[in-house]
Amino acid sequence: MYLPILGAIALASGTILEKIVLKRKQMNIKLYQTAMFLAAVLVMIPFIYFFWRMNAQAFELKNILIFCAVIATSIIANLFVFYSLKWEKVSKLEPARILEPLFVILLAILFSFFVGELYERNFKVIIPALIAACAIVFSHVEKRHLKFNKYFLAAVIGSFFFAFELIISRLILDFYSPITFYFLRCAGIFLISFAMFRPKFKSLDKKSIKLIFITGAIWSIYRIVIYWGYTTLGIISTTLMIMLGPIFIYILARIFLKEKIRWRNIVASIIIIACVLYAVLS
């Protein structure tokens, strides 16, 4: 149960680092997307030798099509999220970004009616997960957020596509080890992004390259933990634990981006921790 908490810390760290890299003047989202996924692939190569696993079912046409859908939705999600992060503050985007776990829970419940053995319907987990998700959302609702600007809307769309990608990934996760699945996913995204955008890597300075590699490593940890949690603990249980991520985002945004932590965020954090404890101890 400690691994999803590590994932939550990785989520917060990756978000803050991503913002730091994207706000650099020479960085555009197409270059960043291609470079970041290349970095993730390179970071994982040494571990693939030890943790590679890919079952024969992965080569069935149905499962290949699902994997292609995972890559396509991930490309869309990342472009929307990178676009929003490039031009908007993390604190202003959090209300949109935190919709992702709520989308994941709702989609998991929906899919459970069709593929029940893969998507849990344990109400001892679902109810606290929904309460925690709603607490996060309502802690960010303000009058100014009712007027969506294009960056906020892009973040909402990105959150939905990320949630949808994670849900359909569960259909084929059992055929791979977590690191194999993420390695192939990142490799596919990199190759398609490179072919589409033809980025100029020479424009990257040493500091940007270093930050991109660190970010790629952090996101690798986050997604591998997510995939492990989905197959071991269940989607909703893992998502509930990952909801601790916004708490760490508040703390890191305060330390590194000098953004204020409001009382609503503190109340939401207490509710999230209570829901996680309830689900774990019940």
Image: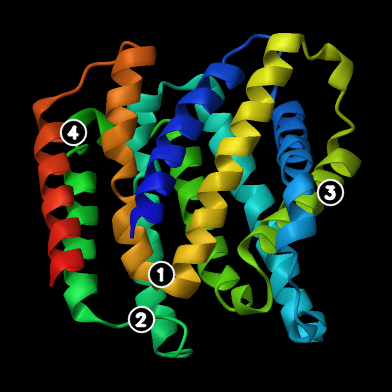
Identify the residue position indicated by label 2 in the image: 120
State how many labels appear.
4
User: Which of the 4 image quarters holds residue 106?
Assistant: bottom left
* Mark 3: amino acid: Ile
Is the residue 94 above or below the residue 1 in the image?
above
In this image, 26 relative to 215: left or right? right
Ranked by sequence position, the earlier of labels 2 and 1 is: 2
* Mark 2: amino acid: Glu
In this image, 86 relative to 58: left or right? left
Is the residue 265 above or below the residue 51 in the image?
above
Q: Residue at x 9, y 38 (%)?
A: 267
| Callout 4 crowding tier (Cα within 10 Å): few <14, some 14–19, many ≥20 | few
Q: Are marks 3 and 4 in contact (CB under 8 Å)?
A: no
Q: Residue at x 34, y 27 (%)?
A: 92
Marks 4 and 2, how far apart at CA: 33 Å
Identify the residue position indicated by label 4 in the image: 142
Which label lies toward us, 4 or 2? 2
Which label lies toward us, 3 or 4? 3
Disc 4 element: loop
Q: Residue at x 31, y 56 (%)?
A: 241
Residue 235 - label: 1
Marks 3 and 4, how far apart at CA: 39 Å
Ranked by sequence position, the earlier of labels 1 and 4 is: 4
**Closer-to-camera residue (259/218):** 218
Identify the residue position indicated by label 3 in the image: 192
Residue 223 locus on image (x, y percent): 55, 52
Q: Are marks 2 and 1 in contact (CB under 8 Å)?
A: yes
Q: Residue at x 59, y 69 (%)?
A: 169
Is the residue 195 above or below the residue 145 in the image?
below
Ranked by sequence position, the earlier of labels 3 and 1 is: 3
Ranked by sequence position, the earlier of labels 4 and 2 is: 2
